[in-house]
Image: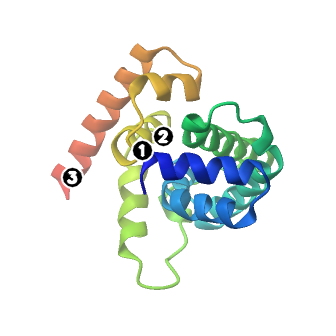
Amino acid sequence: MESSEIKDRIKKAQRHDKEAFIELMQLYRKDMYRTAIAILMNEEDAADALQDTILTCWEKLYTLKKPEFFKTWLTRILINHCYDMIRDNAVYTDMESYEEPSRCDTYNLELKEAYASIDERYRLPVELYYSQGFRMREIAELLSVPVNTVKTWIARGRKQLEEYYHDC
């Protein structure tokens, strides 16, 4: 979908067009899921965070000033919900506590294992940069840290991923 079509859908959604909003959520569903998994490392918690994010976005869509920043705005809301869940539930998981996938979903299992090999603070920047195409400046704004910190985190995360895949 082209950016002009996306902007049109965002504007329609801001006028409470449910179909346009649903299309936007479907468009960004996979990116949101990967971001939630990178933070929470648990499918059920990630699904809860996605639901909370979708509801918040629907309720607060009028606050979005510029449609071109919709994905950044959506991602920031998701990140906040994920960290709220961690804070509220004190959810700290390790590899032994991962649930087995309910169906043959090797992508999710491989993704979780790869993310588990990365230090927690590097997961989200690596996901946002490599999987979702955010620029380092955008990631810095999302995470409220300097750009050089994001560059360092991504380089360290990349190094840890390299070691993980080298050992496989």
Residue 113 location in percent, x, y?
38, 59
Q: Mark 3 is on which residue type?
A: Tyr
**Are circles 3 and 2 on residues that touch, CB within 8 Å?**
no
Q: Nearer the viewer, residue 103 or 67?
A: 67
Q: CA distance from mark 1 to mark 2?
A: 5 Å
- Is any atom of residue 41 visible in this view? no
Label 2 crowding class (10 Å Cα cut-off): few <14, some 14-19, many 20+? many
* Structure colour scheme: rainbow
Q: Of the numbered discs in the image, which one, if any, rests on residue 101?
A: none
Q: Nearer the viewer, residue 88 or 26?
A: 26
Q: CA distance from mark 3 to mark 2?
A: 18 Å
The residue identified by callout 1 is 127
Which comes before the other along the chain, label 3 or label 2?
2
Q: CA distance from mark 1 to mark 3?
A: 16 Å
- In percent of the image, x 35 and y 31: which residue is there? 154
The residue identified by callout 3 is 165
Q: Of the numbered discs in the image, which one, if any, rests on residue 124?
A: 2
Q: Mark 1 is on which residue type?
A: Glu
Q: Nearer the viewer, residue 77 or 14?
A: 14
The kind of secondary structure element at disc 1 is helix
The kind of secondary structure element at disc 3 is helix
Where, quadrant-wise, is the N terminus in this rendering? Answer: bottom left
**Are circles 1 and 3 on residues that touch, CB within 8 Å?**
no
Q: Is residue 65 above or below residue 116?
A: above
Residue 143 location in percent, x, y?
57, 27
- In percent of the image, x 50 and y 53: which residue is there? 5
Q: Mark 2 is on which residue type?
A: Leu
Which comes before the other along the chain, label 1 or label 3?
1
